[in-house]
Image (cartoon, coloured by chain):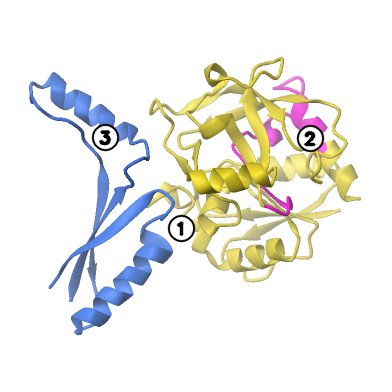
Amino acid sequence: MKISVIITLKKDVLDPQGKVIHQALDGMGFDGVNEVRQGKYFEINTNETNAKKAKDKVEEMCKKLLANLVIENYKIIDTQ
Amino acid sequence: MKSAVITFPGSNCDRDMDVALKKFGFKNKMVWHQDVELPKSDLVVLPGGFSYGDYLRCGSMASKSKIMQSVINFANSGGMVMGICNGFQILVETGLVPGVLLRNKYLEFICKNVFVKIRNKNSDYFKNINNEVLELHIAHNEGNYFCTNDQLKEIEDHNQIAINYCNIDGKIEEKFNPNGSLKNIAGIFNKEKNVLGMMPHPERMIDPSLSGNDGSLFFKNLINNLK
């Protein structure tokens, strides 16, 4: 079973990389961009066949390693 | 006095730290990250560098390595643990000290001398030191200290700020903040003050003919405090 997770910075955490990307987009002529926030995406392939169990396991992984909960949020976006 | 420096894959200030500790009288041992047991030590140091290539988040992979459980147990039983630069990043990832270290505000790798003001002389790290301000070296890409408002309140309530970035006169202002750190924080303690994480490298300031002498003051004072 493959599980996808995205990790994003919390709202009030400064994201200088996102800011620079935003500036670059402005410079390239992409109008109307209000904000860019950069995050991380993981695909985790496990032997687990039970979707609920797989999701719980990945949630534990997020809490223990993949995300730093002081500054980041995680979201399991897909199980297949 | 016995010390131990942990080497992770990608550590690159471990030998400098070894030289500094020995110069001021520590009997130092180098410890590999895959070891399980710490040697008997009065001080454990997590050195600077780029452990695990800074993968995922700086310090995150090293914080899960085998030796770290012993380091955490040692710290929780009151042992002195000091993390410098990447070692500070590892400490925050273990949760031994609060907060995180974000990318520098202006996305630059910063490598220069800075002044830091000693804020808390009640710990064994800074007790009895004569100076209020030290000139130390920083070299990092992720040294921008950040924590939640609740954590900041707790840090301030427990006098956990160890050093702040300042000018030569000890003035703590935003213009002397090299990397965007919250409240100019350059180093913090755990609540009990036996764990210290800081971005500046005292081990790079132990030779007046090469760099400076303020690291010497720090180490001399530290070993005297531990005796």
Left or right: residue B172 versus residue B42 is: left
Task: Name the spot of residue B182 as percent of width and height, x first.
Answer: 52, 33
Q: Residue at x 80, y 32 (%)?
A: B216
Instruction: Tell me which chain the residue with mark 2 is part of.
Output: B
Q: Can the viewer see residue B142?
A: yes
Instruction: Tell me which chain the residue with mark 1 is part of.
Output: B
Q: Colour of chain A?
A: blue
Instruction: Tell me which chain the residue with mark 3 is part of.
Output: A
| Residue B207 magenta-highlighted | yes
Question: Splitting the image into 4 quarters, where does residue A48 fall?
Answer: bottom left
Query: Which numbered circle lies on residue B210?
Result: none
Boundaries of the magenta span: B191-219
Task: Name the spot of residue B65 as percent of width and height, x first.
Answer: 52, 64
Q: Which chain is yellow?
A: B
| Residue B181 magenta-highlighted | no
Q: Residue at label 2?
A: B218
Q: Nearer the viewer, mark 2 or mark 3?
A: 3
Query: Which numbered circle lies on residue A18?
Result: 3
Q: Residue at x 19, y 24 (%)?
A: A24
